[in-house]
Amino acid sequence: MEPRFVADRMLGRLARMLRLLGYDTLYSPAVTLAQLQEMARRGDRLVLTRGDAQKRFPALQNVYSIQSERPPEQLRDVVEHYGLETHAGLWTRCTLCNALIEKVEKQEVESRLDPKILQLYQEFFRCTGCAHIYWRGSHVERITVNLQQLLGPRAK
């Protein structure tokens, strides 16, 4: 079973990067510690925190305390600690809301996009949760290169 995470309010950028890799990662800056614990228990999730795991979550077993303040280092730490696959789920989850992304026909989204984007790109994807539209622009290559530099050849 693939790990599922819930991240505390100090780990918003890490949550987005885990979603980018395809990992189900709940995150909200407004969630209290009690709510976070309940989300972890109810959803069988691993808790990621920047604080002292034993003090903040004494009743939970599956808590990992991340030392670094820098999101790229946090991601590398979590990937190494849990032995995460870094390319199989790439680009399958919405980085904004965590829902799955599906391929859609161009005509389904053209009313929501700038005409320049529609001229440049033919393949589009939509979040099944928040309906955010994605396409494989130049940012995809840049993000992929950054992930490869950060995580090594495993990230493709």
Image (tube, rainbow, N blue to C red):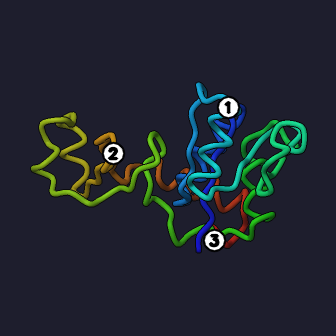
Q: Position of residue 94 (x, y in %)?
A: 43, 48
Question: In the picture, which quadrant includes the C terminus?
Answer: bottom right
Res 85 label: 3
Q: Position of residue 110 (x, y in %)?
A: 14, 42
What residue does disc 2 label? Answer: 129
Circle 3 — which element?
loop
| Earlier residue among tags 1 and 3 | 1
137 relative position to 28: left or right: left
Asked if marks 2 and 1 touch (Cβ < 8 Å), the reply is no
Task: Give the residue type that dot 2 points to.
Answer: Gly
What residue does disc 1 label? Answer: 9
Q: Position of residue 13 (x, y in %)?
A: 63, 38
Count residues near mark 2 (Cα–Cα under 10 Å), then give few for <14, some for 14-19, many for 20+: some
Question: In the picture, which quadrant includes the N terminus?
Answer: bottom right
The answer to whether 87 is drawn above or below residue 44 in the figure is: below
Q: Quadrant of residue 2?
A: bottom right
Task: Give the residue type that dot 3 points to.
Answer: Glu
| Earlier residue among tags 2 and 1 | 1
22 relative position to 7: left or right: left
Residue found at x 21% / y 34%: 114
Query: What separation in Å lies between label 1 and label 3 (alpha carbons)?
Result: 24 Å
Q: Nearer the viewer, residue 138 or 152?
A: 152
Q: Quadrant of residue 81?
A: bottom right
Query: What separation in Å lies between label 2 and label 1 (alpha carbons)?
Result: 21 Å
Q: Nearer the viewer, residue 125 or 84?
A: 84
| Front of the two marks 2 and 3 | 2
